[in-house]
Amino acid sequence: RRPGDASGSESDEEVKETADEKRLRMAKSYLDKLRAEEDEAASGDDDDDEEDGDGDNTRNMDSHDRLANRLKNEAWQGSGRVRRELAHRLIQPAPEDEDEDEAQLDEEGDRAGVVWRGHRLAVTGLALTGDDTTAYSVSKDGAIIRWDVESGAKTKYPKTPAVVLDPTKGGGGPMAPPRCGAATLLCCAVSAERHLLCTAGTDKRIHVWDTRTMKHVQEFASHRGAITSLAIREGTGQMFSASTDRTLKVWSLDDMAYVDTLFGHQSDVLGVAPQRRERVVTVGRDRTCRFWKVAEDSQLIFRPNPGAGQLECCTFTSPDTWITGSDDGTVSLWSTTKKRAVMSWGGMHGFGGLGESAHGIVVPKFSTAEEAAGAAASRAAAQELCGVSAASAAAPPGVSNAGRWVNTVAAARGSDLCASGGGDGAIRLWRVSDEPGRQLMPLWCLPARGFVNALVVASSGRFVLAGMGQEPRTGRWARDASAKNGLLLHRLKLSD
């Protein structure tokens, strides 16, 4: 109650806390919590200092330094300046785990992963909230589903409203949706801070939903082709959309308005990935990878080696490096300091035996044939688990060479752990580092029958979630009848 108010009435107005006071109170509470944790962790180390006269002062100084270093590291990790090391903490499942009794397998989960059903057709897009608790998926049948990652419970969104053309508001002519297949959704992005979910597809529209009420709140019309990728810059309301009309558009979710169009690609833009700064990387069917400086309205153009495949997907691993996947099974690491890929592993996704010339893996410089054989063995083991034969280079019936395409790549936010997926029955894990000649190294593979059309890795590194389908994301030129349409969850184990 107000100071000096002695009435004691229940109807007296309470003192309202301003925004600055709330921030100050929360900051003090957070610092007190960190101090308690640091004091508890350091209590065992400082027992010997109690014999000295200045033990209390020494402990206070050490606690202050540790707290300052912890806050600095957390700030750097949040801004992406420091890369968290998760890859070396991963525990690879041992082959002898297959012989364990059924009770233990039930507790630890099936090595083939857990499939969540809910989509009638192939899953095409996947988005994960920053706290790794909720996932959103879209599919070719136009369904939008919210998933609880812990329990697997699902909640279906209403169908996307049909586009109604209004001559007074534009959106007609080249921006009109197609007469057939307009309900197909190809991508989605979520902003948990603003409680917004964005979906897009072949109707050339971006649909904005309120995640609290699951209601459609806005519709953006500006593209003249199908929208292939959506991405929201972390911590902001800035959204980027890529399309087959060869453009990259910028939107503001705070103002619910169109901002700008970036030109440069000479063919369809297939993927877009932003970072915390106003930097974006895109890949397109013109066989280029472009690094955009949005504020400066400039771009850097990167091209794969002559004869290499077409780039299909991309994601950032640090503010200045990113990885891409190609339609020939190649996964590459790029940097703003080089026009060519820093490191490329060819044929990492595909079919083939374990022979030296049968697996088709092309190792980069400074890598050995033993590392290629190990990568092929892990791929073959994952394929055997999901029913894909690794004895020959022949793809399953109906899959053909489309199974070699790297449809999606993903990275755990702010860490060195990455993943790539195709249609060969394996999700491959990667480790990114700054060590010369070892900047991009394969770890092992997870089984995944069908086409991996979307992929996310938890920021904690505890799981990998894949959007699976019997068909590729952007077409129907291949089909794996033995696959299931839905989400595939692989739990990962980390050492302490």
Image (cartoon, grey):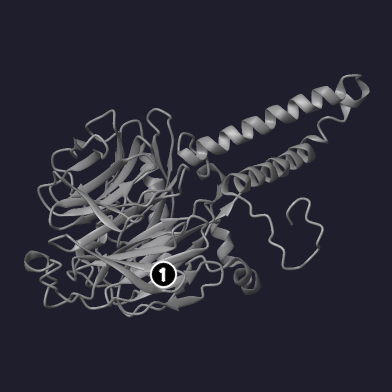
Q: Residues within 10 Å of mark 1 (few under 14, many from 20)?
A: many
Horizontal relation, residue 25 to residue 449: left or right:
right
Mark 1 residue element: strand
Q: Using the rendered view, name the quadrant where residue 293 is placed.
A: top left
Which residue is more in the foreground, 265 or 453? 265
Q: Residue at x 56, y 72 (%)?
A: 151
Across and down, in percent, residue 109 comes to: 56, 68
The spot of residue 447 in percent (x, y) is 42, 63
Where does residue 153 sit, x and y in percent of width and height? 51, 75
Q: Residue type at mark 1: give it.
A: Leu
Height in image: 322 above or below 222? above
Residue ID at (21%, 42%): 289
Q: Position of residue 365 (x, y in %)?
A: 31, 32
Above or below — where is 303 with respect to 420? above
- For the point 69% across and 45% down, which residue is it? 29
* Residue 383 visible (yes or no): no
Q: Is residue 387 left or right of residue 285?
A: right
Left or right of 115 on screen, residue 71 = right
Identify the residue position indicated by label 1 in the image. 487
**Which one is nearer the viewer's eye here, 420 or 25?**
25
In the figure, residue 180 lies in which quadrant?
A: bottom left
Q: Quadrant of residue 205?
A: bottom left
The quarter in which the N terminus is drawn is: bottom right
Question: Which residue sits at x=12%, y=61%?
Answer: 224
